[in-house]
Image (tube, grey):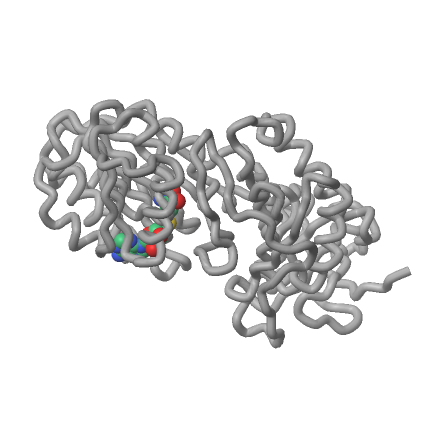
Amino acid sequence: MLKFSKVVLKKGKEESILRFHPWIFSGAIDRIEGTVEEGDIVIVHASDDRFLGIGHSAIGSIAVRIFSFHDITPDLAFWCSKFQAAYSLRHKIGLTTRKKTNVFRLIHGEGDGMPGLIVDFYNGTAVIQAHTVGMWLIRELLAQALQVVLGKKLKAVYDKSAKTLPFKAAIEPIDGYLLGKQITKEVMEDGNRFIVDWEEGQKTGFFIDQRENRKLLADYSFGKDVLNMFCYTGGFSFSAMQGGAKLVHSVDSSAKAIELTNQNVELNFPADTRHEAFTADAFDFMRDINEKYDLIVLDPPAFAKHKSALSQALQGYKKLNSRAIQQIRPGGVLFTFSCSQVVTKQNFREAVFSAAAISKRNVRILHQLSQPGDHPINIYHPEGEYLKGLVLYIE
Ligand code: SAH
């Protein structure tokens, strides 16, 4: 039987845990019985010694992330049950049996009761991204559990955690295959094919979270001149082309992203002259796009990674959106997003409101967008709601 150190909370600090919020802040801890290193599994008790949960410890303001509110043994069978529950959810919402989509998020951190862990499934390859040392330390066990749950559907497991682990941790992670080897890097989303580069690409290689929003864009694209700003590997561009856009311009500041976009255009729409890609900075490119586009997508990277950067980030969203709202053709439609976790829905809405107000144009909200079902939000952990989008009609 494994023996874990015990973390005892101060009196009254158990309330949020009893409501299944998975984080324990360092200030809530009264004492630790035993020794604890970053990433160790610990058992959490209330001041009256009631069992509260079991989780991974970390250095920092979030001292423990709970992965079970039951008194379990965190062995292979336990992690299999977690993955099985997550897989069942994806199966129930139809993501595992779609003919034209073979990419989905299998584990979305707190949303799947596994704080600090992301697992994306790319047509047979599971890409694991640990955000905590605790999850990284058990990566081999997690890979085994994935194999048990996914069976033949799983061909390989790739660990891509080197850049997402806390930089202060005294570990030296190296990305690589934990199981199997590369079979194919081609995936399909709603009939569009993509080369996903999980080794060199951003995040786990692809932005799965925009799947449903890309589908909506297709419905708005027929006969339109479209600008896909912050295109990465071209996701929104292909939806626009699929939807019958007249012209599509894809822009990203990363030359590597533009190269991948062009490669993906060839896969889906060989020699299609409607599409052109540009390596450019968004703010520069949008300085002078006067009435060139009917449909604009703005999907920038997170402008604020921490609360301290919030006000600067909101200025960034305002500036970017004001360029689009001022210059879009009359009767144009803008899909605008924020994926910063610290920017609330309200914050983002206010930034876009300010941008609209400067333009003095009549602006209406057509849709309010969010993240899809394979990026579930634990209702007890609202911090997990990170993707916000607005679709605007600009007269
Ligand atoms: N819409 C994409 C994901 C966008 S991720 C999709 O559906 O897949 C954000 C992208 O913004 C990244 O590719 C990054 O290279 C790019 N980027 C970051 N800063 C930029 C800037 N100042 N100008 C243009 N692109 C930028």
- The image quadrant where one finds the N terminus is bottom right
Residue extending farthest to the right is 1
* Rendered residue at 72%/66% (across/down): 40
Q: Does residue 17 sit above or below 93 in this rendering?
A: below
- The image quadrant where one finds the C terminus is top left
Instruction: Return the residue nearer the eye: 155 or 324.
Output: 155
The answer to whether residue 311 of the structure is visible from this angle is no
Q: Left or right of 69: which side holds 274? A: left
Q: Count the marks.
A: 0
Horizontal and vertical percent for residue 185? 52, 48
Q: Left or right of 370: which side holds 130? A: right
Horizontal and vertical percent for residue 18? 69, 44
Q: Left or right of 63: which side holds 233? A: left
Residue extending farthest to the bottom is 170
* Rendered residue at 66%/69% (across/down): 38
Instruction: Return the residue nearer the eye: 261 or 114.
Output: 261
Horizontal and vertical percent for residue 203? 47, 54
Q: Does residue 70 sit above or below 40 in this rendering?
A: above
Horizontal and vertical percent for residue 149? 74, 41
The answer to whether residue 332 of the structure is visible from this angle is yes
Q: Left or right of 156: which side holds 301? A: left
* Rendered residue at 37%/51% (across/down): 260
Instruction: Return the residue nearer the eye: 45 or 76.
Output: 76
* Rendered residue at 39%/50% (across/down): 340
Instruction: Return the residue nearer the eye: 176 or 53.
Output: 176
Q: Quadrant of residue 377?
A: top right
